[in-house]
């Protein structure tokens, strides 16, 4: 007989729900991120074990639980166990590994759709970015393709979109140049594993007076320390490399909000592009 304890897998999204709407300090974000990353076992860890995993002090874990409204960490752990034990089942159940990975992306998109039930936050982000001339778009490493994808379409409705997709000393130069040219806001794409250079760039951008909108994977992402508006979209982690389906959808939703913030300008630029494309015969259809 096998007496080994089998721990049910708590969905990270359900653990994330425990932190919704709460402004966390950098240390508290580390603890929250740790609990999400170890969602399957978090409900069975002691405060000391969580502190060790998050590389914080044990009192910090206690203060974190109190900040969430619990009497202490044991009460938070009981709630984590409730989340684990009442899991109604995962939408990824059944099928092979590849099918489960794709179905998990459907769940990520459903969660994103729920977040958009109140469009005020995304509308505010769109209005903020629409008025920035130029509009710098930051995306390093895994986020670079997402930044380029967004910028390709954004350039059809915005007169000056600048992609910042390489790090090093040149990144700081380009941030300074964008600010000197009149930029008032920055769009940042920051995805796991959260490049250190991205966070350094956000710090510099904030210190330079740029207002930051960030697309990231979680409300407890490290970008929350620097961004004025954080727009989370879950990243798929069921394959060897992450799937960015929901962040890509969110990027296009944000671009729609930019168009809605200045519809006449967007329409004028789109018509000008279509006329130019027809004249140059850019497309077959």
Image (spheres, rainbow, N blue to C red):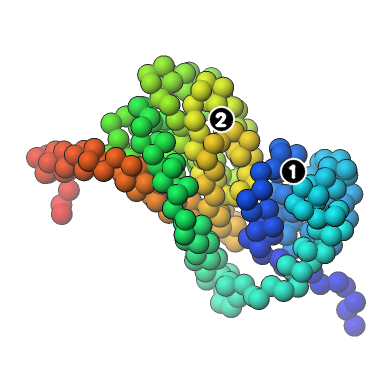
Residue 284 in the image: x percent, y percent? Answer: 15, 52
- Which mark is nearer the camera, 1 or 2? 1
Placement of 33 over or under 167, stated as above or below: below
Image position of 143 (left or right of 132): right
Q: Is residue 140 visible?
A: no
User: Secondary structure under badge 1?
Assistant: helix
Quarter of the C terminus within the rendering: bottom left
Q: Residues within 10 Å of mark 1 (few under 14, many from 20)?
A: many
Residue under the image location 88 percent in, 73 percent down? 4
Residue 143 in the image: x percent, y percent? Answer: 50, 42
Image position of 128 (left or right of 195): left
Q: CA distance from mark 1 to mark 2?
A: 20 Å
User: Secondary structure under badge 2?
Assistant: helix
Q: Nearer the viewer, residue 2 or 249?
A: 249
* Residues tagged 1 and 2 counted as in contact (Cβ below 8 A): no
Quarter of the N terminus within the rendering: bottom right
Q: Residue furthest left?
A: 279
Q: Nearer the viewer, residue 228 or 100?
A: 228
Q: Quadrant of residue 129?
A: top left
Q: Is residue 46 visible?
A: yes
Mark closest to the chain's N terminus, 1 or 2 = 1
Residue 33 in the image: x percent, y percent? Answer: 70, 49
Q: Which residue is mark 1?
A: 28
Q: Nearer the viewer, residue 276 or 60?
A: 60
Q: Nearer the viewer, residue 159 or 59?
A: 59
Q: Which residue is mark 2?
A: 202
Residue under the image location 54 percent in, 50 percent down? 232
Residue 116 in the image: x percent, y percent? Answer: 46, 56
Residue under the image location 32 percent in, 29 percent down? 160
Image position of 48 (left or right of 241): right
């Amino acid at each position: 007989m096998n007496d080994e304890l089998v721990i049910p897998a708590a969905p990270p999204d359900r653990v994330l729900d425990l932190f919704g709407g709460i402004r966390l300090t950098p240390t508290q974000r580390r603890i929250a991120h740790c609990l999400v990353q170890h969602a399957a076992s978090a409900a069975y860890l002691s405060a000391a074990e969580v502190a060790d995993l998050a590389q914080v002090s044990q009192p910090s874990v206690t203060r974190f639980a109190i900040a969430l409204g619990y009497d202490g960490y044991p009460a938070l752990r009981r709630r984590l166990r409730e989340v684990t034990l009442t899991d109604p089942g995962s939408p990824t159940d059944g099928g092979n590994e590849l099918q489960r990975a794709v179905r998990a992306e459907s769940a990520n998109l459903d969660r994103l759709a729920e977040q958009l039930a109140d469009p005020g936050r995304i509308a505010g982000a769109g209005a903020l970015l629409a008025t920035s001339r130029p509009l710098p778009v930051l995306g390093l490493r895994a986020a670079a393709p997402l930044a380029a994808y967004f910028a390709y379409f954004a350039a059809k409705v915005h007169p000056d979109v600048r992609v910042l997709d390489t790090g090093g000393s040149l990144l700081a130069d380009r941030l300074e140049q964008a600010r000197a040219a009149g930029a008032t806001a920055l769009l940042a794409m920051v995805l796991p594993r959260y490049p250190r250079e991205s966070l350094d760039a956000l710090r510099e951008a904030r210190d330079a007076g740029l207002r930051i909108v960030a697309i990231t994977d979680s409300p407890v992402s490290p970008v929350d320390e620097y961004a004025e508006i954080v727009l989370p979209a879950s990243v798929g982690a069921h394959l060897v490399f992450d799937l960015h389906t929901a962040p890509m959808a969110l990027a296009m939703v944000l671009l729609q909000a930019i168009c809605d913030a200045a519809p006449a300008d967007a329409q004028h630029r789109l018509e000008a592009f279509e006329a130019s494309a027809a004249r140059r015969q850019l497309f077959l259809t």
